[in-house]
Amino acid sequence: MDLFDELEWRGLVYDSTEGVRDVLAREKVTGYIGFDPTAASLHVGSLLMMVALAHLQRHGHSPIAVVGGGTGLIGDPSGKSVERQLMSVDQVEANVAGIRSQLARFLDFETTVAPARLVNNADWLTKLSAVDFMRDVGKYFSVNAMLTKESVKRRIDSDEGITYTEFSYSLLQAYDFLELYDRVGCTLQMGGSDQWGNITAGMDLIRRLRGGKAHGLVMPLITNASGTKFGKTEGGTIWLDPELTSPYQFYQFWLNVDDRDAVKYLRFFTFLGAKEIGELEEAGQREPEQRHAQRALARDVTQRVHGATAVREAEAAAHALFSDRISSLTLKQIEETLAGVPSLTIPMAVGWPVLDLLAGSSATKSKSEAQRLIRGGGLYINDRRITDEKEHLTVEHAVEGKLFVVRKGKREYLLVWIR
């Protein structure tokens, strides 16, 4: 398959300009995707774009990752109900630096054949003269046409409105395309479907100023089976930085995707072929409880983002947690494995009566409820079933003398820290 066929069977083509299929089949093109440096790390919502650039390179084309150090100072209004908080130059530069290593997990910047490039649009946008930009670029944009853009219309109709700063964003993105066309012959821009208007504006600018032909291809905005935005959980955003989202949490995010999404996500986020994905789908239909597709998805994506060691450690931690071997985990592993679990802090003491410890916590609301839980055999502390209502815990019972892991039933946890 050529690149377009590859993206199409994976479900990654939402729309494209006329002729792009033929161009990708007969030529080696240079294409780019922009990444917004609003944080020091990308998140799983950026993975589809990273994978798309990797597919571009795998098919012999030249990918460019444009980190928006310049446009990041403005903020894209697409999909936003209110204006972003403007960041300082130092903030944007720090965020750009944090994103570089994450892109390198997917793109080969060292190969001599179609090497990937990483560029920062601050290199040219921050050097523009406002008067020259309005005269040389702004005159090619119709305000009437810009007002018809969905992202602009939505904001105009809102109480917040839209500032001139954000209104100008599409001009700057269009100029990025022109600049890359001039510098390296870039003729393709890809992105999410919400970027279609910005992409076609850049194509039009290249046609008007250079008489050149450029193309656009956009991918669907992903929602999960329940209709909510992909990558958002009750615990918040799933980041690619292991300091913001632990590899265990990252692995569990993929392992826990809905059965209805698992095969689709294998096509979207991995490089597994049709035969292997088909086999995983069939295995899932035979043994849905084994979560074959989710397990393959979690292993593949976690290994690419965090490495093989992170996969082994995540699976070992999960096995220890769900086979009642918490004592085999370190304090750090428990923190990562049970991140987001309710917790409370108790002062250092000679000992703590179990009933006093639990009463009023998220595990039990009262001593009588704690008593019923113990009598029913449903209370565990650090994997040990508590059978005596009068039991006292001591520091010796705690993990590394600092933590009690309280489990109610099979899956309800409470962390009790000794400070």
Image (spheres, rainbow, N blue to C red):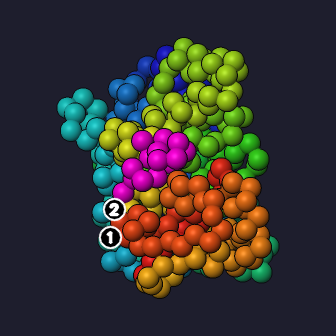
Comparing 90 with 398, the one in front is 398
Q: Residue 94 carries which label?
A: 1
Amino acid under disc 2: Gly
Q: Confirm whether the magenta stretch covers residue 327.
A: yes
Q: Are marks 2 and 1 in contact (CB under 8 Å)?
A: yes
Comparing 273 with 139, the one in front is 273
Q: Confirm whether the magenta stretch covers residue 236.
A: no
Quadrant of residue 164 within the rendered picture = bottom right
Comparing 377 with 149, the one in front is 377
Vertical side of 288 occupied by 242: above or below: below
Q: Is mark 1 on a helix, strand or loop?
A: helix
Instruction: Give the magenta part as a residue range.
Output: 316-330
Kindly tell me whether residue 285 is visible in this rendering. Answer: yes
Quadrant of residue 31 within the rendered picture = top left
Amino acid under disc 1: Ala
Which residue is rendered at x = 42% and y = 41% of the image? 316
Quadrant of residue 275 within the rendered picture = top right
Vertical side of 71 occupied by 45: above or below: above
